[in-house]
Every structure is written in C-alpha cells, then in structure tokens.
Image: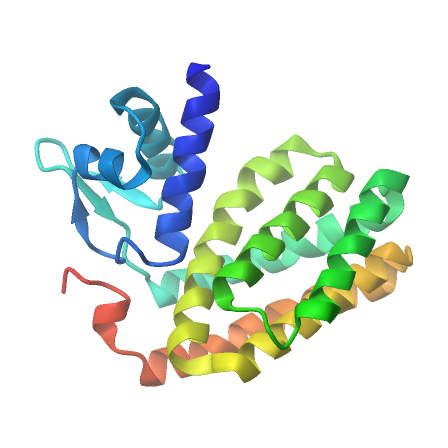
Amino acid sequence: MGESLAVVAYDRIEDLIVHCRVAPGASMTTSALQDLVQLGRTPVHQAVRRLAAETLIRIRPRDGLQISPIDLQRDRRLLQLRREMDRFVAELATEKLDANQRNRLLRLGAVFRERRRAMDVAEFNTYDRQLDAILLDAAAEPFLDRTLRPLHTIFRRVGHVHLTHLGGATGLSRTIDRHLALVVAVVDRNTRGAKVASDALIDFVQANFDSLEGAIDPALLDAGQ
C-alpha cells in the first residue's frame, strides 16, 4: 500500500508540475504539497525524492523545496538526447508491438481524430502520456522507461507553457497531428515511417523553443526571479 500511495503522490505532483499549478522556480514545503495532493507525509516524501532525482524538484536542506525552473538552454540540449531515444523507441515498438498494444494505439488514434478540435492542453497531455506509456511498453526495455519518463515530463511542461501562452489552438492541432502520424506509422509497423514521424515531432518541439526564447515572459519560466 505504501508503494502504491507513493506512485499516486508522484503522479499527482508530476501533474501539478507539468501544468504549472506549482510554478516553475516556486518555493514549496512538503506540507504544502501534502495539502495539494491530499496525501500523507511518507508517500509525498517518497515522491519528492524521486522527482528530485529526475531534476524536476530541488531539495534545499533546511530551506524546503523548489520546483525546478524551466531552463530553455538546458532543455534544448536534452531534446537532442530525447530525439535519439524516441526514435529508438519508435523503431522497437514497430517491431515488437503485440495485439493488445496495437488495439490501444488504434483507440488512441481514434481519440486524436475525434477530439482534435475540442481538446485542451490538459486533455492532450493525458493522451500524450498514454502514448508514451504504450510505446515504451511495446519497446520492452526498462532502461528506456526510467530515462525517458522524466524527459517526457520536462518537455510536457515546456509544451504546456508554449501552448497556453503562445501556440494556442493552432499549435495544439499541429501537435496532435504529429502525434497521430506517429501512431499511424507504428500501428502499420512502418519502421522507417515511425522514425520519420518521431523526428518530425521533435523538430516541431525544437521550433517552439525559438518563440519561447523570444516572446515568453521570463517569470513564467522561473517564478523565483
């Protein structure tokens, strides 16, 4: 039970971070996080330690916690790592996809098509996370899961900031289209197409950094400034 509560705490805090309900760079206490996620000290403490190891939270001895700011220069560098790993996952998934995983991707693709014009950023992030989980499950390599999950969280938060403040509905539709192209390629077991779609998605994310660096209020990236 303790482990499952720690997972629940992690998921809830991660959601707060991704959607900036706790602002990048904001100072926090463990007790404040407990109140926000409505869980006790032990599972929240365990979740915080995990998030700190993933560089999403900074633990400051005798001075509480800090939600890690968004560092666009660092994230640009990490995006190159994500590019290579996402492409590898897409390749493995097309080769190892089983019937259950394929059906889950088909359902997800249908949702992307049906909800494309009505979906908001929070709903999209729910499906984006499901897509990541299915592809990693199909790839069946635990090392990739442990490494890519925090990377995906980092970029999901950057994407939330971009789509909320700059990209709008048009940017969200373009994001959905690129995710749908990846789903279609993997479902069709088109290895080359899946790698191309994966790269196209990363190219889209990379292009968003230019507008973020030029137009976003720095306080949205680091509330502690």
Q: How many marks?
A: 0
Residue displayed at 77% across by 40% down: 138
Residue that protrudes farthest toward the top in the picture: 1
Between residue 72 and residue 185, name the one nearer to us. 185
Up/down of 158 relative to 27, above or below: below
Residue 58 screen position, x and y as percent: 25, 42
Quarter in which the C terminus is drawn: bottom left
Q: Is residue 64 left or right of residue 178?
A: left
Judge whether residue 42 can be spotted in this image: yes
Residue displayed at 19% across by 54% down: 26
Q: Is residue 3 left or right of residue 101?
A: left
Judge whether residue 200 can be spotted in this image: no
Residue 197 screen position, x and y as percent: 75, 67
Q: Is residue 94 left or right of residue 146?
A: right
Residue displayed at 74% across by 56% down: 108
Residue 87 screen position, x and y as percent: 71, 56
Colouring: rainbow
Corner quadrant of residue 218: bottom left
Between residue 73 and residue 181, name the one nearer to us. 181
Between residue 152 and residue 7, name the one nearer to us. 7
Residue that protrudes farthest toward the left in the picture: 62
Residue displayed at 78% across by 62% down: 110
Residue 70 screen position, x and y as percent: 32, 61
Corner quadrant of residue 41: top left
